[in-house]
Image (tube, rainbow, N blue to C red):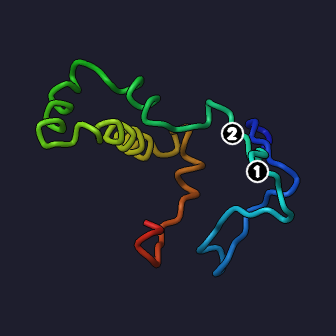
């Protein structure tokens, strides 16, 4: 992660439980409120805003209208993010997001983890 610009504070760590099936972030000592624990560069953040900027076009207007007609006007930003994820999954190893997508869990034991 360091080679792509991700930085973490000294007390930050990822904890694995249940043989790697559960992973969460923790600190090894108390930290002050507002103290940054992890820095992720902008180019590594996948967001609905970026997905819309990349994928939104005149060709997408009918799909947007359909979502709005179904009462999902507040959700169509997430729809673009879902499309971006599906596009990157379809690209497989050719996607710059492949290492991250491939690292995501494929097994969930409870509904909140889904």
**Relative side of 55 to 50, left or right:** left
State the count of labels: 2
Residue ranking furthest to the top: 58
Q: Nearer the viewer, residue 90 or 76?
A: 76
Mark 1 — residue? 33
Image coordinates of residue 55 in percent, x first then y, are 35, 27
Image coordinates of residue 54 in percent, x first then y, are 41, 25
- Marks 2 and 1 in Cβ contact (< 8 Å): no
The residue located at (84%, 65%) in the rendering is 28
Mark 2 — residue? 40
Q: Is residue 42 above or below residue 85?
A: above
Q: Residues within 10 Å of mark 1 (few under 14, many from 20)?
A: few
The residue located at (84%, 61%) in the rendering is 30
Q: Earlier in the sequence, mark 2 or mark 1?
A: 1
Q: Residues within 10 Å of mark 2 (few under 14, many from 20)?
A: some
Q: CA distance from mark 2 to mark 1?
A: 19 Å
Residue 34 image-quadrant placement: top right
- The secondary element bearing badge 2 is classed as loop
Residue ranking furthest to the front: 33
Of the residues tagged 2 and 1, which is closer to the observer?
A: 1
Residue 71 image-quadrant placement: top left
Image coordinates of residue 106 in percent, x first then y, are 48, 67
């Amino acid at each position: 992660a360091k080679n792509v610009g991700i930085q973490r504070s000294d007390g930050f760590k990822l904890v694995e439980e249940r043989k790697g099936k559960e992973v969460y972030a923790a600190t090894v000592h108390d930290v002050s409120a507002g103290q940054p624990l992890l820095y992720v560069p902008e180019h590594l953040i996948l967001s609905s805003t970026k997905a819309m900027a990349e994928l939104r076009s005149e060709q997408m207007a009918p799909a947007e209208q359909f979502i709005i007609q179904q009462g999902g006007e507040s959700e169509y930003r997430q729809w673009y993010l879902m499309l971006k994820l599906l596009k990157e999954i379809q690209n497989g190893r050719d996607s710059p997001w492949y290492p991250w997508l491939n690292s995501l869990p494929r097994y969930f034991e409870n509904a909140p983890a889904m």
